[in-house]
Image: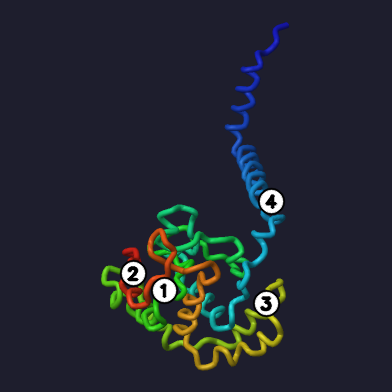
Amino acid sequence: MTEKHPAAHNQHAHEKLEKNVGLMAMFIALAVSFGGLAEIVPLMYQAEAIEPLPGVKPYPALELAGRDIYVREGCYNCHSQMIRTLRFETERYGHYSLAGESVYDRPFQWGSKRTGPDLARVGGRYSDDWHRVHLTDPRAVVPESNMPSFPWLADAAVSADEVTSRMRALQGIGDPYTDQDIDGAAAAVAGRSELDAVVAYLQGLGKHVGPTYGTPGTGAPVDDTTQAAAPASSGE
């Protein structure tokens, strides 16, 4: 009686797996699951990944409303909020992004595409007026921009009920909003437009880690008088 060669047996096993779509899908799902667990579980035990950086707090009412509008309008499709640890990125955008900055981002806005520039540290780079013009008519400040206009934001009022409800929901899942914060939300957004809210959100981004932008290689703050001429991508 002849024994089967181990190589032939292995080949048969491979063929059986490759020809069975269901079995192949199950093994792929298993491999992906183990890979994901290996990356995610250790982060749950690293304080720097789950604790906010000093000064990082839940978004104030107006900024929270602006963030929700930013998500609603799909801004994340063209703008990332994740500066990688690469020299050409830190020289242009500032300090690389840290996990503790995104603790209160639900969902996070890291993004995966940059038709326009990264916005992780855009706060303070431009004036409020610049942002208002840019959101209403991008080509008025960046002629080569392919960004869409959002003129309706100026005419739409921020909904106090939606902001209050959102803050209460976030409080329920652990964000440290106080009852006083929630009770004051309506007053904080009273008379404010959605354009005001988005500008407030953008101006608050990235102010927790050193200078937001600077002269390449130095980290020195950019002079306010030159901000409007600061380089941006063609998608801005």
Mark 2, mark 4: which one is toward the viewer?
Answer: 2
Identify the mark nearer the N-term, 2 or 4: 4
- Residue shown at the point (73%, 6%) measured from the top left: 1
Mark 4, mark 3: which one is toward the viewer?
Answer: 4
Q: Quadrant of residue 160?
A: bottom right
Residue underneath mark 2:
230
Q: Name the image quarter holding the C terminus.
A: bottom left
Q: CA distance from mark 4 to mark 1?
A: 35 Å
Identify the mark nearer the N-term, 3 or 2: 3
- Residue shown at the point (33%, 66%) measured from the top left: 231
Secondary structure at badge 2 equals loop
Kind of residue indicated by mark 2: Ala
Identify the mark nearer the N-term, 1 or 3: 1
Kind of residue indicated by mark 3: Ala
> Residue placed farthest to the top in the image?
1
Kind of residue indicated by mark 4: Pro
Instruction: Determine whether 157 is above or below 103 in the image.
Output: below
Identify the mark nearer the N-term, 2 or 1: 1
Residue 169's disc number: 3
Q: Position of residue 114 (x, y in %)?
A: 41, 60
Identify the mark nearer the N-term, 4 or 3: 4
Residue underneath mark 4:
42
Mark 1, mark 3: which one is toward the viewer?
Answer: 1
Q: CA distance from mark 2 to mark 1?
A: 9 Å
Mark 4, mark 1: which one is toward the viewer?
Answer: 1
Identify the mark nearer the N-term, 4 or 1: 4
Q: Position of residue 45 (x, y in %)?
A: 72, 55
Secondary structure at badge 4 equals helix
Q: CA distance from mark 1 to mark 3?
A: 32 Å
Kind of residue indicated by mark 1: Arg
Residue underneath mark 1:
125
Q: CA distance from mark 3 to mark 2?
A: 39 Å
